[in-house]
Image (cartoon, rainbow, N blue to C red):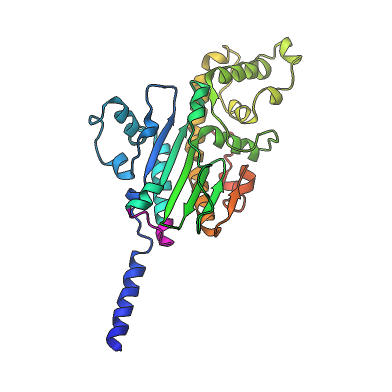
Amino acid sequence: MVRYSFLLAAIMMASSATAGECPAEAVPIQIIEGVGYDSFPNHDFILTLEDGTVKDVSHNGGRNNEFAFSAFKNANPHFSYFVKTVTKHVADRLGKENLCINNHDSRKRSLLQFVNWRLFIGREKLLTSVPSIDRIDNNLSGSCRVVSPWIDIVIGRSPVPWVRGVVRWNQRQLLADQAILDGASNVPPGVAKPLADRELYRVTFEYMDADIDHTPAAAKLKPLDVRVPADLLWLFRLAVQTTRWPFDTTAMNELDKSMAIVMEKGSKSYTALTMALIDRCLASEGENLHYSSILDAADLISLKQYKIDTPVR
């Protein structure tokens, strides 16, 4: 009897030691770049953190493979941090729930698709190929689901552990969140979509005429907050402004600088919000959870800490 007790205790200790130790390198991930190049169909490549950070595959599969891997390996540090941190967090949380993606069937069902969206893109049609998890059956045993502007995720427990998610690194979403927290009431709910180049130029000229040049014709138009999206208006007013030369000649450069500052200040909070939504899914015991606005996430994170105080320079 004593020998049996020792054996049982040993088994229990071994089980507790392995809980929470799912390898992040086992979670399949996919990098989808929202850039203006049709010649790089990189969304067909499934990677892992090991592939993206250790293996040198740039010369193994031609130009497309090189771009697909460098999209993660050589991306801006904020996006790279986001991919690594979120993937590792998913693995850690699945480990705590004894849901490791550690067999062929689990990996076949699982995928985290990281969408890298800059503020503006070359062509509108690039948005038509954005991945979706709408077709996944959420009636499987023990599954949970979160739909939000930052991440859509489904986690299943049966017949094997699995996870599917569309995880958005979305510059414009961070701007929309900041505009809402700054008091804007006209920010559309849901996912903030990147702007096509021509739309960005249009709103830039709208802002230039109304807020800087103060042309007589601009006075006859609708209010600026009707003509320019609230999130872009929030960003424009961070940019250096001058009447010594036309605003549009330096607009793109100044917007890039302001956007870089915003991402620098907001990237960790944005990542923390994404992880909090993953935690909320696992704690929900099979619920379908929907978030439309940053205000809906007040029970997940501190909105005061998430808010970027202005001016940012």
Q: Which of 110 and 258 lies nearest the eye of the viewer?
A: 110
Give the image location of residue 263, x and y in percent: 49, 35
Q: Which residues are magenta?
A: 93-103
Hey, which residue is sitting farthest right in the picture? Answer: 220
Q: Which of 137 and 64 lies nearest the eye of the viewer?
A: 137
Give the image location of residue 181, x and y in percent: 64, 40
Count every numbered label the image shows and give the total: 0
Q: Is residue 118 visible?
A: no
Q: Main secondary structure of the magenta part?
A: loop
Which residue is depicted at the point 40% across and 48% down?
A: 109
Left or right: 127 with respect to 178? Answer: left
Left or right: 144 with respect to 97? Answer: right
Which residue is depicted at the point 55% across and 57% down?
A: 286
Which residue is depicted at the point 48% across and 52% down?
A: 155
Q: Is residue 137 visible?
A: yes
Give the image location of residue 113, x and y in percent: 43, 40
Q: Which of 47 and 179 lies nearest the eye of the viewer?
A: 47
As displayed, is residue 80 above or below residue 36? Answer: below
As displayed, is residue 174 above or below residue 202? Answer: below
Q: Is residue 94 magenta?
A: yes
Q: Which of 83 and 190 lies nearest the eye of the viewer?
A: 190
